[in-house]
Image (cartoon, rainbow, N blue to C red):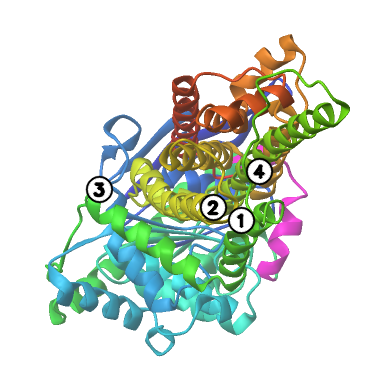
């Protein structure tokens, strides 16, 4: 049984406490199908989130089978299913793959046969078996609602909560979804609660809870609604509610509640007897193919990682962009040195005595200066383009799927596992991009470093640092667009604040330099140049070049800082 006792949820708005749910009390027996209805903004979704444990109550208590969830802990992830208003499946996956992903993340199964048996059972139970190979992106609204329900049924939850799953559907599809939820409530004594703005199909519910301005104003059988509210048609209830205050409606309900609850209790007992007779003729033994325990860290990691790779491979636009960037950006670099960087020239040991000798030495100096500027520019160009790659890699990686992640976190996905799967995927991109950039450019331009490996490592660290920072931004941002914009701004500041092109004033350089990863990668590579080229670079820039070990250390610190904010962001709840 689910029971609410004087449950309240209050927010602070403009310095005042505003109750969104005000002392809600009700009981929902096992095997019950309840609708929560009311005008827009009355607190329906807020109440459902309180029951789901997404919102934390300000006052009151929430009980499950006599256990106080406020003090004794929330329901286990496998015990509760929550279907939000937004889509929880990826468009690039098929129906079957979406359910398989839900099973891998939420259910321990005993072998492949048990795994596929569970997937097949859920598909059959929700009527999705004929659509199992259909991509999510081509499903109708009603089919997507069925899929969302199916993904929650993989754990056989004893409490299933649905938030506006019939919103925007045509009447036929709406009735099909409501009938499906009705059928689900009759199996395994499951409680199903559906938030809906629609007043159609109320006869399929065991009870209806009506909210008005955060207060309970009715909870009883649907057939008694018109009598209680003194209306001819159920659709007239909302206009009727607006004619009295929520406090007045609630006071009226408190006076008549016992009478309506007696009728509801009688109906619930009759339903319970009927259900026991059905259970006696049906094998309702526990399903031994799975455990209520959440899969381990490693199992969740591989499920998330391979799902991300599959989505990436099927996203034609993103895949084309990645390939175009991977091939195009190094080409942009080598355009400035198709014939290679060349060699520096040495000045004569003796002073020039003729105009011709003076002119030759002038040409040598100009040649060396040009080479110094070219090498410095080529290295910085690589670093900046890798920063752009990093931004494209990570800016939207978490923010774009934030709500899906929040839903999966509620279902038992560990934030650390989720973040590690992102790092594995992005790390793969970083290595491919950085190594290809370094090898391709080096083979054509021949940047004159003493050793190639330090150059490649510094480029890789620059990419990894910017990827980590952008991932942290993505994790902390409220929207994907906000994360993308902030990341692009960050990349845009790399070149002017690095000091590689124009030296910054000393004070400004010391203030900004610690935050500019492009500087540290560039400076480290400049330190690894052959002696004559290093001297040439020193003559074309006034920017201080930090020692190599500091460059490595700072870039690693940037990576750690980015990962820290990424972890803080994924740990934080961000439903809205």
**Residue 461, horizontal then vertical, whole percent:** 47, 37
Task: Reply above or below: 76 against 33.
Answer: above
- Which of the two labelled residues, at mark 2 and mark 3, occupies the earlier sequence position? 3
Q: Nearer the viewer, residue 283 or 444?
A: 444
**Residue 448, horizontal then vertical, whole percent:** 54, 40
Q: Say which residue appears at 52% left-offset and 55% top-offset.
A: 443
Q: Nearer the viewer, residue 516 or 34?
A: 516
The residue pinned by badge 1 equals 330
The residue pinned by badge 4 equals 378
Q: Is residue 339 left or right of residue 143?
A: right
Mark 4 vs mark 1, CA separation in Å? 10 Å
Q: Quadrant of residue 175?
A: bottom right
Give the extent of the magenta segment.
Answer: 233-250
Mark 4 vs mark 3, CA separation in Å? 43 Å
Q: What secondary structure prevails in the magenta region?
A: helix
Q: Residue 243 magenta-drawn?
A: yes
Task: Reply above or below: 394 against 347.
Answer: below
Element type at mark 1: helix
Q: Quadrant of residue 354?
A: top right
Q: Residues within 10 Å of mark 2 (few under 14, many from 20)?
A: many
The residue pinned by badge 2 equals 437
**Residue 121, horizontal then vertical, whole percent:** 27, 79
- Which of the two labelled residues, at mark 4 and mark 1, occupies the earlier sequence position? 1
The residue pinned by badge 3 equals 297
Image quadrant containing the C terminus: top right
Q: Is residue 413 left or right of residue 494?
A: left
Q: Are marks 2 and 3 in contact (CB under 8 Å)?
A: no
- Which of the two labelled residues, at mark 4 and mark 2, occupies the earlier sequence position? 4
């Amino acid at each position: 049984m689910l029971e609410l006792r004087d449950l309240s949820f209050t927010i602070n708005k403009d310095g005042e406490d505003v109750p969104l749910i005000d002392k809600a009390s009700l009981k929902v027996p096992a095997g019950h199908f309840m609708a929560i209805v009311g005008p827009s903004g009355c607190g329906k979704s807020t109440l459902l989130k309180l029951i789901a444990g997404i919102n934390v109550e300000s006052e009151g208590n929430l009980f499950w089978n006599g256990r106080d969830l406020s003090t004794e802990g929330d329901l286990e992830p496998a015990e509760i299913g929550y279907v939000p208003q937004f889509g929880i499946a990826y468009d690039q996956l098929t129906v079957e793959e979406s359910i398989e992903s839900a099973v891998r993340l939420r259910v321990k199964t005993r072998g492949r046969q048990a795994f596929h048996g569970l997937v097949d059972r859920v598909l059959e139970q929700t009527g999705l078996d004929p659509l199992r190979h259909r991509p999510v992106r081509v499903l109708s609204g009603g089919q997507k609602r069925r899929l969302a329900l199916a993904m929650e049924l993989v754990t056989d939850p004893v409490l299933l909560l649905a938030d506006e799953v019939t919103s925007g559907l045509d009447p036929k599809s709406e009735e099909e979804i409501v009938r499906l939820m009705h059928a689900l409530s009759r199996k395994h004594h499951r409680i199903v609660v559906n938030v809906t703005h629609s007043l159609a199909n109320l006869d399929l519910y065991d009870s209806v809870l009506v909210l008005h301005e955060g207060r309970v104003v009715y909870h009883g059988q649907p057939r008694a609604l018109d009598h209680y509210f003194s209306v001819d048609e159920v659709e007239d209830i909302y206009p009727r509610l607006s004619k009295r205050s929520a406090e007045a409606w609630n006071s009226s309900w408190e006076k008549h509640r016992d009478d309506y609850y007696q009728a509801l209790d009688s109906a619930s007992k009759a339903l319970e007897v009927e259900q026991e007779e059905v259970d006696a003729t049906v094998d309702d033994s526990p399903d031994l193919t799975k455990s209520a325990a959440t899969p381990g860290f490693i199992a969740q990691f591989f499920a998330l990682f391979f799902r991300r790779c599959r989505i990436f491979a099927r996203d034609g636009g993103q895949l084309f962009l990645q390939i175009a960037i991977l091939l195009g950006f190094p080409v942009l670099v080598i355009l400035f040195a198709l014939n290679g960087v060349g060699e520096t020239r040495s000045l004569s040991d003796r002073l020039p005595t003729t105009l011709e000798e003076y002119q030759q030495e002038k040409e040598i100096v100009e040649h060396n200066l040009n080479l110094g500027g070219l090498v410095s520019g080529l290295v910085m160009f690589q670093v900046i383009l890798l920063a752009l790659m990093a931004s494209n890699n990570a800016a939207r990686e978490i923010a774009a799927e934030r709500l899906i992640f929040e839903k999966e976190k509620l279902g038992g996905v560990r934030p650390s596992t989720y973040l590690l799967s992102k790092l594995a995927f992005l790390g793969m991109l970083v290595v491919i991009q950085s190594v290809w950039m370094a090898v391709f450019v080096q083979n054509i331009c021949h940047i004159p470093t003493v050793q190639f490996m330090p150059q490649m490592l510094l480029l890789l660290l620059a990419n990894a640092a910017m990827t980590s920072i952008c991932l942290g931004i993505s994790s902390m941002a409220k929207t994907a667009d906000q994360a993308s914009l902030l990341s692009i701004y960050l990349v845009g500041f790399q070149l002017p604040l690095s000091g590689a092109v124009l030296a910054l004033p000393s004070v400004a350089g010391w203030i900004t330099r610690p935050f500019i990863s492009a500087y540290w990668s560039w400076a480290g590579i400049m330190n690894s140049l052959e002696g004559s080229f290093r001297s040439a670079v020193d003559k074309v820039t006034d920017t201080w070049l930090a020692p190599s070990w500091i460059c490595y250390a700072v870039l690693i610190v940037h990576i750690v800082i980015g990962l820290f904010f990424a972890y803080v962001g994924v740990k934080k709840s961000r439903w809205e």
